[in-house]
Amino acid sequence: MTTHAVSWPPLSPGERSVAIEVLVHGPLSRTELARRLDLSPGSLTRLTKPLIESGLLVEVPEAGAAAQVRQGRPSQPLDVVAESRAFLGFKITSDRVYGVVTTLRSEVVARLDRPLSTHEPAEVADLLREMTARLTPRFPLAGIGIGVGGHVRDRAVVGDSPFLGWRDVPLAALVEERTGLPVVVENDVAALVEAEIWFGAGRGLDRFAVLTIGAGIGYGLVLGGRRVPYAEQDRGFGHHWIINPHGPLTPDGERGSAVSLLTIPSIRYQIRAATGRDATYEEILAGAADGEPMAARVIGEAARALGTLVAQIANFAMPQRILLAGEGVGLMEVAGVVVEETVRAHRHPLAEPVDLATKVSDFHDWARGAAVLAIQVLVLGSAEG
């Protein structure tokens, strides 16, 4: 089954700036919008007219007052109709696909997950087609975003994904052929960072960092309100970031690296190697909270590693806020005090406290990040990466 995207004409750079400002911060009066973008009233009128005519922007009543006409121009603030378009976001893990449908403002309005029994690219694309077909009758879909752990080229081709065993897979083309919808593919951490810039903990901040812990470690830096691309992105961040050269040696990551100390697979490996028993991450955290010696030691080392990473990011990147996200953030509930003590120990005594926000993320948050990438690229014409 194929469908056709419901979309708008391409936007000029000026129109795109107006649309983003209203999307992220609206509703906004014309006066406020012109002030934010440093535009004359005439320029703003010229840029907003096609956005209103296309239905991307609408005039809404002023809060607490009836709409009035001032100096011949309507005073109604401008806003987007968030429900006018819907976006599918997929997060592909090694054993499951997590899907969400969001509005234009990234509110999740539906979820749909399916087990992944094969990593064959064509069959994965078939599964995404089936999931899309389930949701198409219910929502005015404008496009699809897909988040994958690994290296992605041109927001279309998965160059290398260790979790899926993929190399040079044209995932966007495969899914577009099957669904008839435009598709954008991106590294999952990059997508999550973009979502937080627009609609989350980084909104309105000039300098912002995201650190994710879970199956791996991810890092994103935002400067001037824009995500900073870097060469090592998607290449197994943290494998060579040595926290303790005498730390544990695990199958994934150098001895004492951030990955060896802090990721969920490495923590589980350490417990299994020491006790001969397999335990889930949640069981290990519970054991540490109950004072079980081995669990407490491993989780304590992980907490000190996390505190060291946070302090180093704060020292060198100087962000206004650091967001800690991912499925491993439950570590903070058990050993948050150790993390905070370690951060202070690695900072100047007179340094400002680190604004550390935490977000216990499930894979639907990663899928939502992919949907936000679709909003950025497919609706607003972003070609940045």
Image: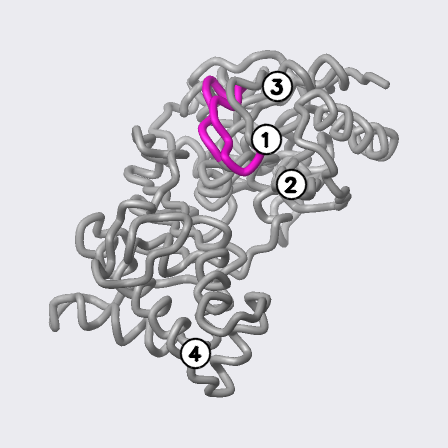
Residue 23 - label: none
Residue 69 is inside the magenta segment: no
Q: Position of residue 46 (x, y in %)?
A: 49, 15
> In the rendered image, which residue does mark 1 sit on?
74
Is the C-beta separation of discs 3 and 2 under 8 Å? no
Decide: few, some or many residues near mark 4? Use Cα within 10 Å; few <14, some 14-19, many ≥20.
Answer: some
> In the rendered image, which residue does mark 2 sit on?
67
293 to the left or right of 163: left
Placement of 324 over or under 227, stated as above or below: below
Residue 78 at least partly seen: no
* Amino acid type shown at disc 1: Pro
85 to the left or right of 380: right
Placement of 344 over or under 115, stated as above or below: below
Which label sits in the foreground, 3 or 4? Answer: 4
Is the C-beta separation of discs 1 and 4 under 8 Å? no
Placement of 297 over or under 253, stated as above or below: below
Decide: few, some or many residues near mark 3? Use Cα within 10 Å; few <14, some 14-19, many ≥20.
Answer: many
